[in-house]
Image (spheres, grey):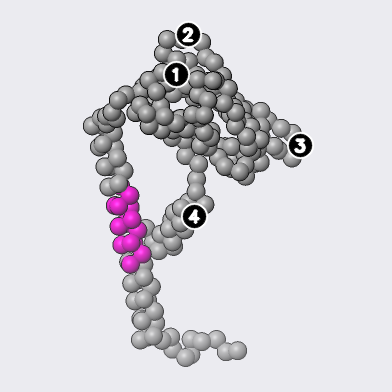
Amino acid sequence: MNCVSNFVYLTVCVALQCYGACVEVDSDTEAVVHEGFKLGCIFCKMRGEVQAMASVEWYFMAADETEYSLLYTYEDKAGNIMDPRFDFRLAWNGSKDTIDLQDGSIYILNVTYNDTGTYRCVFQRTLLYSNYRCQTNNSKTVQLHVVSKLTRGMASILSEIMMYVSIIGLQFWLVVEMIYCYRKIAAAGEETLEHPPPLHSLSPL
């Protein structure tokens, strides 16, 4: 890999870190009783440059129920708790200060065992093109289990360790590549100073 391609790669990495990128991540599914819990729901736009507006609806079906009931709605920068079982215990945890929602997550305060069940997030997005509008709908389901103490499986622990190892390895590789490019450019500059081109090779003005 040459220095030019390395520079482009570094530029892309810095841009992603500075401006952020939408990544669809599955929600956690295990909550601890009496603590808070984030119900994640992210739907990224395929084309970030297209303006859009979106609304989010959350539905809940308890473990002993057979039908969903409307839990929470968010539209025009305002959220409403629709299920009295969650009064004063729900908060918006998604995209802020915009109607162009991509993160529709909510946060449950003071989780109880009765919160065990199935949650369904419904995204309704309208893409605003210059000549027309396009309506899209997406949904995700989260099966929530409430426990007295959080337990982490071996797969989860190994996955987190591998993630940190990968991040450290990538940063180390980038540093090595930058040092290599710097030394290569510096060596080329020194060689030019030690062996300047002959005067007769210079074109007259």
CA separation in Å, label 4 and label 3: 32 Å
Residue 48: x and y, percent? 59, 43
Q: For residue 176: magenta?
A: yes
Mark 2: secondary structure: loop
Residue displayed at 60% across by 28% down: 80
- Is 84 displayed left or right of 158 in the figure? right
Residue displayed at 62% across by 34% down: 78
- Label 4 or label 3, whichever lies nearer to me, is 4
CA separation in Å, label 1 and label 3: 39 Å
- State the image quarter where residue 185 is shown: bottom left
Q: Sequence order check: which comes first, mark 1 or mark 3?
A: 1
Q: Sequence order check: which comes first, mark 4 or mark 3?
A: 4
Q: Sequence order check: which comes first, mark 1 or mark 2?
A: 2
Residue 19: x and y, percent? 52, 52
Which disc, if any, is residue 118? 1
Which disc, if any, is residue 66? 2
Residue type at mark 2: give it: Thr
Residue range corresponding to the magenta coloring: 166-179
Question: Do the residues under discs 1 and 2 have CB atoms within 8 angstroms?
Answer: no
Q: Which residue is mark 3?
A: 131
Q: Answer yes or no: is residue 30 visible.
A: no
Mark 3: secondary structure: loop
Q: Main secondary structure of the magenta part?
A: helix
Q: Which residue is mark 4?
A: 18
- Is 60 displayed left or right of 2 in the figure? right
Q: For residue 147: magenta?
A: no
Question: Do the residues under discs 4 and 3 have CB atoms within 8 angstroms?
Answer: no
CA separation in Å, label 4 and label 1: 36 Å
| Relative depth, front residue between 122 and 80 | 80
